[in-house]
Image (cartoon, coloured by chain):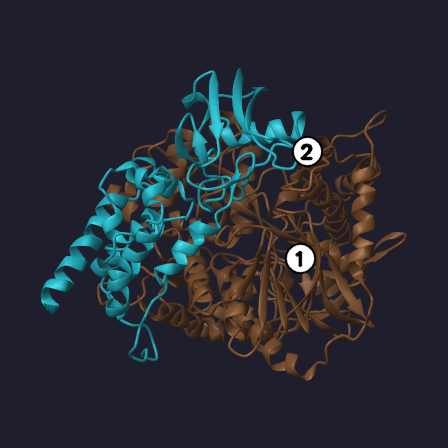
Chain colours: A cyan, B brown
């Protein structure tokens, strides 16, 4: 079957402004949208730029906007799409070329939440103990592949006035360390999160949860971060 | 531009990151990667990491050693295997201390599960040795090590490709890299260079490997006159999701999944009576394809079924969420109620750049070290996996030898003077790139994707699970014809930013070299051992081939040589499971 891809194109080297180009590809219903994009680049137009790596939704490289919704083209099959598909770069981030965006600000925000275990007490010779329930609490959060679909779908991040919000992806990782029974960094973590650019930037609009390719209940996790901040502050008062 | 660092690490997967985290305390370390942070293919590892912790039942490192040696069909160097398995518990505890969210036992210890070829008392029965975080172990370890690298302010050159290694009087003094975003070439000058670039599965048509897994560092080494070791040993993972080849972890069978043919028969009972579905990967892959050849594939097609339906929804959701999500997304199959179609998929290369136990690259049979150059992880061949790698030993290899390489570089770098050469290696690379960019289309023009597809077809048809003399020779001839055709592939994208056309064309040229190396190594090994199965020589021949293949690049083509296997504790025995 034939499928048409209407692809966002922009090459700052030669284009004054972005435009859309329509490509037609022959595809099997079970082909991935990523396969179609590759076929375009290999067979029709080698100048189309997009990132990809694993091809099956574990590396997070190929986040883009598909028919207006952020997702991974390696997870979308042709049969789930209409005869013409609109393919655009992730919003929020600066376009470098075509579907490739500059993720430096994404990783910068990620780094800002101290994404590592803070453990003051010396570790034992073997493993620290942690119950299945304690690690189970982190199970959905550690599925995150940093594809940036949530952050670029968030209306708070999309609004230029509140664009300094750290964003759902960074907060998912903040949750993952904040709620890790082995972590002792609470005192350092709370001030970073207890700000309007931190957890309070979330307006509970659920867009992140709707688009997450790994089905992480992002909004709920952020809600738990907010509750934790509230509890900690109440205790210290 | 010339950029100075003490240590340059190429590759940001587990081996590269583990080395970086080790070395960065005292040295100025830079990590170069083709992809953005956490996109490296280590993240696709699912099932676990081996270590004889004994958390679930009695286990000993000696049993782990034996299993690894037997799994590798006695080709692995036993001194190196011993280093790895004895260091395994420390490597796991260290990860735990860094924060890896391991699955846990009810007592709060790291949970362990069964995996292919992991046994107690030297093969008597399966043992739970695979430490895991559900079925996304690679991803969470990659994230944790990346987080540690952030904490230590490691310098990353992301989306930079390595185009050339630089040598000054025999010492490696850095690498020339290409910045994908700008098209700029840089000379990263260093006292020590570590190659941690992963495998080369993308030379095959069906593979679990990501698009970036093209193995160019192997070809760069080879073209410098450094040999490649044991490249005939390519692992086909038995359970790739059919027809895409996406990895379905052995954890599925470790948790109790069963392979069935078109009659519903659990056929592994016939091939490995003792441990059945938990036999080593080479054996299970051959069994699946033997069933298919006998017409017992599902619907007469090229796959069998992986049955998880008896495991129950709860266990599947807790332990196998990722792989069942693949079945759902790509095939619309609910693994709790229907079997998953699977077939062997190219997964791992046991061979690679010859190294010692501290990552030093070895230039010849006598073990001469290439100064300044190190390799670790899948691109290296220590050799611990021999002729066939056991599941979960790869992550262990990355962690143990990544750390040891980092340690060796950190200790050796201060004693090395900075290269005083005024040589500018960027110019030569620039000329080579310009030559490629100037290749024009027109009459007789070849298309890179067609050449690549044909390469992958040749490797599938001539260099897969079953091999013969005649077929391998045909394959080598076909690759040589393709190399000539490759010379007529133009780079039609002339842009500077994100020119994947240019990068893929360079990769393709290097991949064709690797194909020839793989097939030539396989042609000269006239025996069957581990993943290398010759239908015309179906028996293992220890008299002639209990030794490692070394392939050197010469103007006449690959030259084959050998070096002895190190045997310390276990003399070769008949390998049955």
Q: Secondary structure at mark 2?
A: helix
Local packing at callout 1 (Cα closer than 10 Å; few below 14, some 14-19, many 20+) is many
Q: Is residue B366 above or below residue B395?
A: below
What mark, if any, has residue B453 been given in the picture? 2
Outermost residue to the right:
B556
> Disc 1 marks which residue?
B540
The structure residue drawn at horizontal position 72% and vertical position 42%, both measured from the top left corner, is B508
Residue B526 vs B127, above or below: the answer is above
- Name which residue lies at 51% across and 73% down: B22
Q: Residue B461 placed where, x, y %?
A: 68, 36
Seen from the viewer's position, the closer of residues B376 and B466 is: B376
- Where residue B444 sits: x, y (%)? 85, 27
In percent of the image, x 45 and y 39: which residue is there? A63
Q: Is residue B273 left or right of residue B234?
A: left
- B360 to B200, vertically: above or below: below
Of the image marks 2 and 1, the number of the one nearer the N terminus: 2
Would you say B275 lies left or right of B500 here? left
Q: Label for residue A209?
A: none
Residue B568 shows up from this direction: no
Residue B209 drawn at (x, y percent): 56, 46
Q: Chain of mark 2?
A: B
Instruction: Note whether B522 is above or below A123 in the view shown.
Output: above
Residue A176 seen from this side: yes
Q: Quadrant of residue A16?
A: top right
* B21 sits to left or right of B309: right
Residue farthest toward the bottom in the current orientation of the protein: B415
Residue A147, image quadrant: top left
């Amino acid at each position: 079957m034939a499928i048409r891809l209407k692809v966002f194109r922009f090459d700052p080297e030669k284009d004054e402004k972005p435009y859309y180009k329509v490509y037609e590809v022959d595809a099997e219903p079970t082909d991935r949208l990523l396969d179609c994009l590759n076929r375009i680049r290999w067979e029709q137009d080698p100048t189309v730029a997009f990132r990809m790596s694993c091809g099956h939704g574990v590396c997070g490289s190929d986040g883009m906007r598909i028919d207006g919704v952020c997702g991974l083209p390696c997870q979308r099959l042709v049969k789930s799409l209409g005869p013409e598909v609109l393919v655009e770069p992730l919003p929020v981030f600066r376009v470098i070329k075509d579907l490739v965006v500059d993720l430096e600000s994404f990783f910068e925000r990620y780094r800002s939440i101290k994404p590592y275990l803070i453990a003051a007490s010396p570790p034992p010779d073997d493993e620290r103990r942690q119950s299945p329930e304690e690690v189970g609490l982190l199970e959905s959060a550690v599925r995150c592949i940093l594809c940036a679909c949530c952050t670029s779908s968030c209306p708070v991040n999309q609004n230029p006035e509140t664009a300094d919000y750290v964003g759902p992806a960074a907060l998912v990782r903040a949750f993952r360390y904040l709620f890790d029974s082995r972590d002792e960094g609470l005192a350092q973590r709370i001030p970073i999160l207890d700000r309007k650019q931190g957890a309070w930037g979330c307006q509970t609009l659920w867009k992140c949860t709707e688009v997450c390719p790994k089905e992480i209940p992002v909004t709920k996790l952020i809600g738990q971060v907010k509750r934790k901040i509230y509890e900690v502050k109440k205790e210290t008062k | 531009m010339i950029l100075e660092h003490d240590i340059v690490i190429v590759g940001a997967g587990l081996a590269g990151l583990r080395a970086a985290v080790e070395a960065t305390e005292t040295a100025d370390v830079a990590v170069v990667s083709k992809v953005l942070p956490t996109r490296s293919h280590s993240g696709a590892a699912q099932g676990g990491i081996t270590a004889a912790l004994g958390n679930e039942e009695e286990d000993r490192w000696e049993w782990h050693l034996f299993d690894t040696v037997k799994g590798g069909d006695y080709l692995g160097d036993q001194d190196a295997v011993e280093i790895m398995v004895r260091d395994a518990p420390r490597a796991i505890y260290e990860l735990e201390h860094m924060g890896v969210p391991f699955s846990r036992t009810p007592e709060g210890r790291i949970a362990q599960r069964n995996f292919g070829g992991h046994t107690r008392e030297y093969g008597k029965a399966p043992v739970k040795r695979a430490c895991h975080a559900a079925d996304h172990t690679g991803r969470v370890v990659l994230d944790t090590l990346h987080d540690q690298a952030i904490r230590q302010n490691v310098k990353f050159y992301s989306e930079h490709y390595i185009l050339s290694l630089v040598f000054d009087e025999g010492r490696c003094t850095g690498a020339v890299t290409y910045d994908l975003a700008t098209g700029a070439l840089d000379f990263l000058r260093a006292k020590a260079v570590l190659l941690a670039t992963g495998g080369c599965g993308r030379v095959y048509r069906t593979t679990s490997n990501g698009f970036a897994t093209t193995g160019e560092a192997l070809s760069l080494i080879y073209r410098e006159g450094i040999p490649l070791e044991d490249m005939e040993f390519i692992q086909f993972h038995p359970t790739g999701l059919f027809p895409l080849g996406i990895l379905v972890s052995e954890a599925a069978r470790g948790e109790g999944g069963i392979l069935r043919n078109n009659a519903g028969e659990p056929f592994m009972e016939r091939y490995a009576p003792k441990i059945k579905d938990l036999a080593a990967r080479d054996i299970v892959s051959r069994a699946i394809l033997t069933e298919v050849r006998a017409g017992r594939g599902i619907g007469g097609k090229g796959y069998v079924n992986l049955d998880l339906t008896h495991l129950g929804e709860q266990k599947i959701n807790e332990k196998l969420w990722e792989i069942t999500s693949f079945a759902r997304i790509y095939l619309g199959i609910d693994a709790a109620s229907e079997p998953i179609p699977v077939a062997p998929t190219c997964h791992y290369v046991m061979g690679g750049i010859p190294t010692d136990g501290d990552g030093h690259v070895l230039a010849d049979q006598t073990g001469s070290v290439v100064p300044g150059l190190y390799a670790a992880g899948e691109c290296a061949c220590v050799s611990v996996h021999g002729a066939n790698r056991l599941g979960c030993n790869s992550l262990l290899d990355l962690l143990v030898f990544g750390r040891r390489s980092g340690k060796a570089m950190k200790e050796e770098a201060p004693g090395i003077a900075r290269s005083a050469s005024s040589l500018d290696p960027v110019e030569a690379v620039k000329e080579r790139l310009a030559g490629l960019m100037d290749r024009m289309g027109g009459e007789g023009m070849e298309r890179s994707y067609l050449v690549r597809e044909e390469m992958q077809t040749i490797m599938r048809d001539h260099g897969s699970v079953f091999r013969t003399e005649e077929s391998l020779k045909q394959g080598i001839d076909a690759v040589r014809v393709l190399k000539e055709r490759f010379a007529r592939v133009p780079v039609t994208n002339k842009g500077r930013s994100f020119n994947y056309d240019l990068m893929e064309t360079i990769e393709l040229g290097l991949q064709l070299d690797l194909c020839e190396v793989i097939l030539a190594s396989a042609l000269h090994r006239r025996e069957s051992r581990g993943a290398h199965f010759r239908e015309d020589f179906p028996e293992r021949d220890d008299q002639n081939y209990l030794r490692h293949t070394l392939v050197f690049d010469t103007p006449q083509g690959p030259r084959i040589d050998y070096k002895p296997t190190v045997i310390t504790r276990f003399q070769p025995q008949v390998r049955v499971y």
